[in-house]
Image (tube, rainbow, N blue to C red):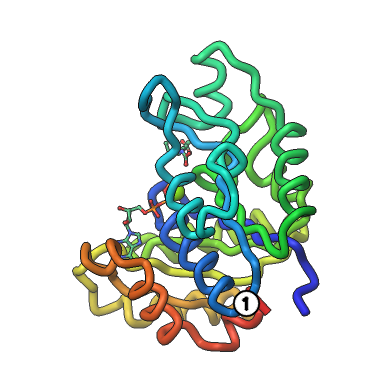
Amino acid sequence: MRPFKGLFVTGTDTGVGKTVISTILVRLARRRGVNAVGIKPVETGCNWRDGVLHPEDGALLTAASDNEISLDDVTPFRFSLPASPARAAAMEGRKLMLSDIVGHISAIAESSELVIVEGAGGLMVPIQENLMMIDLIERLGFPVILVARMRIGTINHTLLSVSALEARSLGIAGIVLSCSSREFGPEEEHTAGDIARLVKHIPVAVTPFLDENDLANPDSVTDVIQSSWPEEFLSRLLG
Ligand SMILES: Nc1ncnc2c1ncn2[C@@H]1O[C@H](COP(=O)(O)OP(=O)(O)OP(=O)(O)O)[C@@H](O)[C@H]1O
Ligand SMILES: C[C@H](N)[C@@H](CCCCCC(=O)O)NC(=O)O
Ligand SMILES: [Mg+2]
């Protein structure tokens, strides 16, 4: 039995693979019989479509959740400017309150078996004045999945994010290194092991490079991940 109602997917940066990993987690959970839904409550950089801001990440999470949740509930807070939520809101003359985001996520968590929440950018991204993504995580109390790029520089970025979470005693359920490039340096086969040794008790998994065909076929991606992540890692996250 999972002791938590939600998982929070954060990253060492924007564009590291949080959406790829969040959608995979939702699909894996659902395959295991857990009625999980994926949400991205705040999305910036949305494009206008038919007079409405369209959240790309939110749409991918809605599809991963088999449309059991509406796009309005997946991503209620949408902004056009591709910036931090606080900056996008300020430049669009709108107000974004952390407490409203917490309220929305808590309501979704109440009505679902498991909610997988994707953040925007990394831990220290401003949401409201001096309140950051890490403050949202702290208020929710959900364990964190930290997604990082498999690329030179990632050991530093990953350990800095782990330090920030540990400084507030926030639980880290796992670290995922996502290989978004086909090129693989000779040191990279050691990166996951090096990070695992340095973070000691936190499990580390690697998501292999997924080509365009893989990414276009969510079922085959889910198969790839199911066979490449250790079962122990999956059961710790999804029960
Ligand atoms: N394992 C992988 N194989 C191939 N491409 C990947 C992989 N992981 C991520 N990518 C690609 O990297 C890009 C960024 O990934 P993604 O959109 O998941 O990042 P993100 O952290 O969610 O970004 P944001 O901060 O904007 O939400 C996408 O084009 C995605 O398809
Ligand atoms: C536009 C990006 N894709 C992302 C916001 C990233 C903000 C990064 C701010 C920073 O760290 O400098 N938005 C989002 O995930 O909804
Ligand atoms: Mg994303």
Q: Does 86 appear above or below 94? A: below
Rendered residue at 37%/72% (across/down): 219
Could you classify mark 1 by the number of other residues whose Cα lies within 10 Å: few (under 14), some (14-19), or many (20 or more)?
A: few
**Image vertical order of residue 212 relative to residue 86, above or below:** below
Q: Give the residue pinned by disc 1.
A: 33
The mark tally for this picture is 1
Front-lying residue, 89 or 196: 89
Q: Amino acid at mark 1?
A: Gly
Residue 208: quadrant of the picture? bottom left
> Residue 30 appears at what percent x and percent y?
57, 71
- Residue 157 position, x and y percent, is 47, 57
Counting from the top left corner in percent of width and height, residue 144 is at 64, 61
Element assignment for label 1: loop
Where the C terminus falls, by quadrant? Answer: bottom right
Q: Is mark 1 within 8 Å of ligand 1?
A: no
Kindly identify the residue that appears in the image at 44 percent across and 24 percent down.
Answer: 52
Q: Quadrant of ligand 1?
A: bottom left
Considering only vertical position in the picture, is 39 above or below 180? Answer: above
Viewer-proximal residue among 169 and 17: 17
Residue 213 location, quadrant: bottom left
Residue 84: % across, % down: 51, 32
| Left or right: residue 107 compared with residue 63 | right
Instruction: Identify the image quadrant of the N terminus.
Output: bottom right
Residue visible at 66% across and 46% down in the picture: 134
Q: Residue sitting at 41 percent across and 57 percent down?
A: 17
